[in-house]
């Protein structure tokens, strides 16, 4: 019994370095779908002449805030290595659909490893070792409780906010533009900003016209919408 306890005390958490953001699915020919939907309003299909017409029309509807046409295209991302702090902020977006790993069903040390995010500011201020030590203690008590028969849904109360959590999100392009506007902003928290910037970079490649006016600033690791 004592040996097991000692071994548990030595169990250190994994440290999540960078989140991984995988584009799982996206509407095929997204910008053409948006243009053709938009042209339905005016029955102006005769003016459909991609790629020139697509750029022109989509930029115009974005400028005029006729944003509902952007709802015809969707994207799904899988995000790993983000903390529960980050996912809690992300899931506040109500027009986005999340599916997140459940701490009621997933058991750390069994279903998956126990992994935490260490905020750079805590590390810079010299708290990294104590931070990891405290997270280890929480993880060990969690394990002891689960081993003693405490349901995972109750043992999880001891786990830190920095615990990582896998999540899949789906949203349409209108909602992604909104999320990027508020979460890539310099005032947003660094972790959600970091993930949203990766999603923005991906969508800029996939749908360059729709996300063209959201400008990334590498110096501040943020992005803002340029109104024209
Ligand atoms: C920098 C920052 C700090 C924050 N701080 C806090 C905080 O301290 N405490 C806190 O509780 N939250 C905080 N939040 C979260 C914030 O209050 C929102 O819950 C979150 O940003 C989701 O934004 P939203 O409602 O605009 O977007 P979404 O839920 O993504 O909705 C998108 C848009 O759809 C429309 N919409 C959605 N639902 C409705 C509805 N029911 N009725 C009418 N229109 C709707 C709105 O136009 C909305 O902007 C913060 C967010 C940011 C970016």
Image (cartoon, rainbow, N blue to C red):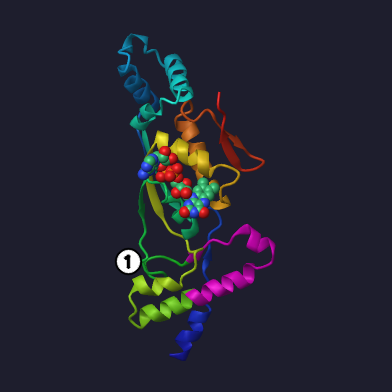
Q: Position of residue 93 (x, y in %)?
A: 41, 46
**Which residue appears at 33% of the width and 81% of the height?**
149
Q: Position of residue 144 (x, y in %)?
A: 42, 81
Crowding around mark 1 (Cα neighbors within 10 Å: few <14, some 14 to 19, many 20+) is: few
Instruction: State the residue in front, 36 or 113.
Output: 36
Q: Position of residue 201 (x, y in %)?
A: 52, 37
For label 1, the residue is 105
185 w.r.t. 99: above or below: above
Q: Position of residue 227 (x, y in %)?
A: 55, 27
Is 224 displayed left or right of 57 in the figure? right
67 w.r.t. 161: above or below: above
| Local SS, label 1 | loop
Q: Which residues are magenta?
A: 115-138
Is 23 displayed left or right of 191 in the figure? left
Work out which residue is located at the far top of the displayed protein and give it.
46
Q: Any atom of ligand 1 within 8 Å of the CB at mark 1?
A: no
Quarter of the rendering occupied by the N terminus:
bottom left
Instruction: State the residue in front, 213 or 200.
Output: 213
Work out which residue is located at the far bottom of the displayed protein and give it.
2
Quarter of the rendering occupied by the C terminus:
top right
Instruction: Give the quarter of the image for residue 123.
Output: bottom right
31 w.r.t. 147: above or below: above
Q: Is residue 135 magenta?
A: yes
Q: Is residue 183 magenta?
A: no
Instruction: State the residue in front, 131 or 92.
Output: 92
Most common secondary structure along the magenta stretch: helix
**Which residue appears at 42% of the width and 50% of the height?**
92
For the question of whether residue 11 can be seen, the reply is no
**Which residue appears at 68% of the width and 61% of the height?**
124
For the question of whether residue 78 can be seen, the reply is yes
183 w.r.t. 37: above or below: below
């Amino acid at each position: 019994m004592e040996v097991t306890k000692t071994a548990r005390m030595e169990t250190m958490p994994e440290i999540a370095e960078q989140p991984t953001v995988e584009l799982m699915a996206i509407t095929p020919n997204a910008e053409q779908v948006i243009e053709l939907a938009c042209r339905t309003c005016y029955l102006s299909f005769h003016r459909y002449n991609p790629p020139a017409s697509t750029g022109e029309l989509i930029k115009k509807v974005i400028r005029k805030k006729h944003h509902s046409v952007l709802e015809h295209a969707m994207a799904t991302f899988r995000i790993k290595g983000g903390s529960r702090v980050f996912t809690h902020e992300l899931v506040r977006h109500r027009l986005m659909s999340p599916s997140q790993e459940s701490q009621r069903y997933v058991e750390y040390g069994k279903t998956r490893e126990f992994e935490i995010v260490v905020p750079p500011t805590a590390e810079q201020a010299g708290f990294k070792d104590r931070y990891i030590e405290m997270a280890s203690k929480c993880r060990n008590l969690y394990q002891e409780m689960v081993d003693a028969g405490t349901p995972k849904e109750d043992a999880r109360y001891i786990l830190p906010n920095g615990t990582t959590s896998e999540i899949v999100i789906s949203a349409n392009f209108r909602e992604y533009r909104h999320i990027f506007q508020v979460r890539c902003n310099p005032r947003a928290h660094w972790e959600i900003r970091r993930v949203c910037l990766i999603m923005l970079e991906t969508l800029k490649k996939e749908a360059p016209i729709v996300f063209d006016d959201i400008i990334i600033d590498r110096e501040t690791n943020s992005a803002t919408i340029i109104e024209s």
